[in-house]
Image (spheres, grey):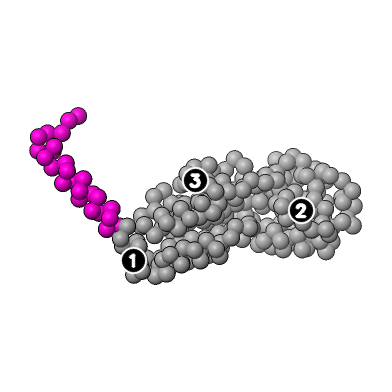
Amino acid sequence: MRLTAAGEAALPYAKAALAAVADINVASMSSPNWCAAVSRSATVTSHNVDMPSLLADFHAEHPNVEITLSTESSDVLIDKVRTGRLDAAIVSVGPDERPEPRSGVATDEAIVAAVCITDELASRKTVRLTDLADRRLIALPVGAGIRHQLDAACASAGVTPHIAFEASAPLALADLAERGLGVAIVPASVPRSRAGLHALTIVPRLRGRLALACGRTPDEPRRAVLVDKARRLLRVGGRA
């Protein structure tokens, strides 16, 4: 394909017009009065990502842009991103899951069983799901990524788990287990620094991941800026 003579004559002006549009976009975003609609983000509660710093950094650069942050289960957050009700969300997913429309993996770690140091299981290094069939389990609620991994693995092993306690954050699960109330199903990093807890590797092994899910194409410059900052914070980029 080749430009016609008229196209060749118009090309420099077209390039200048596009450059001017880009300059206007940069100038408007740099202005202290730059403001548009709300940038909508959300997160699961079970992670150590420094969300306050992320939002504070964005707010310092763009004080007139309103930001909203909410929490929900991973299933709900992924659906809201997919349907455009959220611009971006931090979600918990399984090792083979790729939340659409776009995602990037932030963390990937084992899911373990944690018991208090006086529990009879504290002398062991591993525990089978079948061994936990009659134990009181402490788990995240249905809809959480880690809970989904637990339920799927139990179903595959023919085990019906006895969920005695539910809490929305792994640290709360650890607190309950440390007081001898049951076996907590948590990320491996949770019991690592707790002297009152003993972690056991679950057989078959379970893993969980934290991912950034965002819309296919942020339709406003401010959304692209916030998503880009989140990617840098989580050290992810593009698809997982």
- Relative to 86, say whether 158 is above or below: above
Task: Tell me, yes or no, whether the two marked residues, 2 and 1, touch with CB atoms within 8 Å.
Answer: no
Closer to the chain start, of discs 3 and 2, is: 2
- Circle 1 Cα neighbour tier, 10 Å, few/some/many (<14 / 14–19 / ≥20): few
Marks 3 and 2, how far apart at CA: 29 Å
The residue shown at (89%, 48%) is 123
Marks 1 and 3, how far apart at CA: 27 Å
Is 152 inside the magenta-drawn segment? no
Q: Quadrant of the N terminus?
A: top left
Report the side of 152 relative to 43 (left or right).
right
Residue wearing tag 1: 31
Locate residue 180: give its quadrant.
bottom right
Locate residue 86: give its quadrant.
bottom left
Closer to the chain start, of discs 1 and 3, is: 1
The magenta-colored residue range is: 1-25
Element on which disc 2 rests: helix
| Label ID, residue 237 | 3
Report the side of 63 relative to 27 (left or right).
right
| Label ID, residue 192 | 2
Between 202 and 15, the residue placed more toward the observer is: 15
**Mark 2: amino acid:** Arg
Is 14 inside the magenta-drawn segment? yes
